[in-house]
């Protein structure tokens, strides 16, 4: 596996400009101060389903939970006692067993690219369904590292290099871990680089990468609905621009459930930065 480090200065702000922006911001906030009382009403809990089928021989997972009130701590509210099945091509059922509250696991199974998989979840007397078509795999060629400077502070960011297939709409999801800690979950599409040699820089706000760190990148090829779901989440969080108004991202799961079901291919690369 080849990798390299390049230096790219991004932006250097002058002290005068910084002080001017700070002065204007203080003026605006001081002149527009207003107390707003929020009416946070309790909503009925909603089922949240997050499941996947990959092209690797592994235990496939489905997580089921219920939303919690805004005023309570943000913990995983696992839903117990659901019946979970994935219908493979040809009608073969893949049964999932509950291994802990809200976590359901299959036997070791490998999905097939190009095939459509259907998820069925029976919970609280309601049937929730979703389907996802597994794209053909795109394998990364190599991983590099770029040193970017923001306001004088330089950080190192991983970059994945690969050849995007021509004539096919492709979407990608990256999970970045640094020393086993998840630091980024980001998606890309090939709208402007279809069929080209591509380098996707994985931006993140976590711990700075340093010599000796273990960097693990999981690259997934995902279908269009899965891309739109994770892209909406990134927009809500402000990735790639200002945050947008909070709203539930479009789910591919029926009957009013939140979450996503994804059939995807994946490749995993681990590198120790020297």
Image (tube, grey):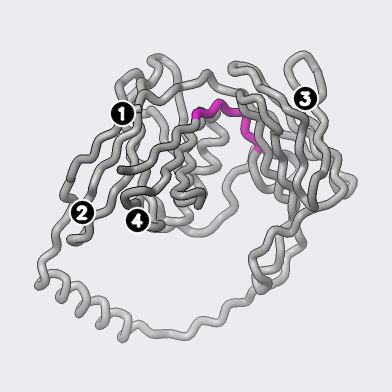
The rendered magenta stretch, by its main secondary structure, is classed as: strand
Q: Residues within 10 Å of mark 3 (few under 14, many from 20)?
A: some
Q: Residues within 10 Å of mark 1 (few under 14, many from 20)?
A: few
Q: CA distance from mark 4 to mark 3?
A: 42 Å
Q: Could you say where residue 142 lies in the image, as x and y percent from the top left?
A: 35, 27
User: Is 249 placed above or below 121 here?
Assistant: below
Mark nearest the camera among 1 and 4 is 1
Q: Which residue does the numbered mark 4 point to in the structure image?
A: 208
Q: CA distance from mark 2 to mark 3?
A: 48 Å
Q: Which residue does the numbered mark 1 point to in the structure image?
A: 2
Under circle 3, the secondary element is strand
Q: CA distance from mark 1 to mark 2?
A: 23 Å
Q: Which residue does the numbered mark 2 point to in the structure image?
A: 149
Under circle 4, the secondary element is loop
Q: Earlier in the sequence, mark 1 or mark 4?
A: 1
Contact between labelled residues 2 and 4, with CB atoms less than 8 Å apart: no
Q: Which quadrant, please, contains the C terminus?
A: top left
Q: Could you say where residue 215 lies in the image, as x and y percent from the top left?
A: 42, 43
Mark nearest the camera among 3 and 1 is 1
User: Residue drawn at (14%, 63%), measured in percent from left and top?
Assistant: 13
Q: Which quadrant, please, contains the N terminus?
A: top left
Q: CA distance from mark 4 to mark 2?
A: 13 Å
């Amino acid at each position: 596996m080849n990798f390299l480090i390049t230096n790219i200065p991004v932006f250097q702000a002058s002290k005068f400009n910084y002080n001017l922006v700070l002065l204007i911001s203080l003026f605006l906030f001081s002149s527009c101060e207003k107390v707003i009382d929020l009416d946070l009403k309790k909503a009925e809990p909603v089922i949240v389903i997050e499941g996947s089928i990959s092209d690797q021989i592994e235990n496939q997972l489905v997580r089921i939970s219920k939303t919690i009130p805004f005023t309570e701590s943000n913990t995983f509210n696992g839903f117990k006692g659901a019946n979970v099945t994935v219908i493979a091509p040809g009608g073969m059922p893949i049964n999932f067993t509950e291994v802990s509250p809200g976590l359901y696991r299959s036997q070791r199974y490998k999905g097939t690219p190009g095939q459509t998989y259907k998820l069925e979840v029976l919970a609280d007397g309601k049937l929730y369904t979703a389907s996802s078509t597994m794209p053909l795999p795109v394998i990364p060629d190599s991983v590099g590292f770029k040193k970017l400077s923001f306001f004088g502070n330089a950080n190192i960011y991983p970059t994945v290099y690969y050849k995007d297939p021509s004539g096919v709409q492709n979407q990608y999801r990256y999970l970045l871990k640094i020393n086993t800690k998840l630091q980024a979950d980001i998606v890309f599409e090939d709208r402007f680089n279809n069929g080209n040699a591509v380098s996707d820089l994985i931006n993140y706000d976590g711990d700075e990468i340093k010599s000796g760190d273990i960097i693990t990148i999981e690259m997934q090829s995902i279908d269009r609905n899965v891309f739109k779901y994770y892209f909406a989440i990134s927009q809500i969080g402000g990735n790639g621009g200002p945050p947008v108004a909070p709203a539930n991202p479009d789910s591919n799961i029926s009957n009013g459930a939140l979450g996503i079901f994804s059939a995807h291919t994946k490749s995993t690369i681990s590198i120790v930065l020297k």
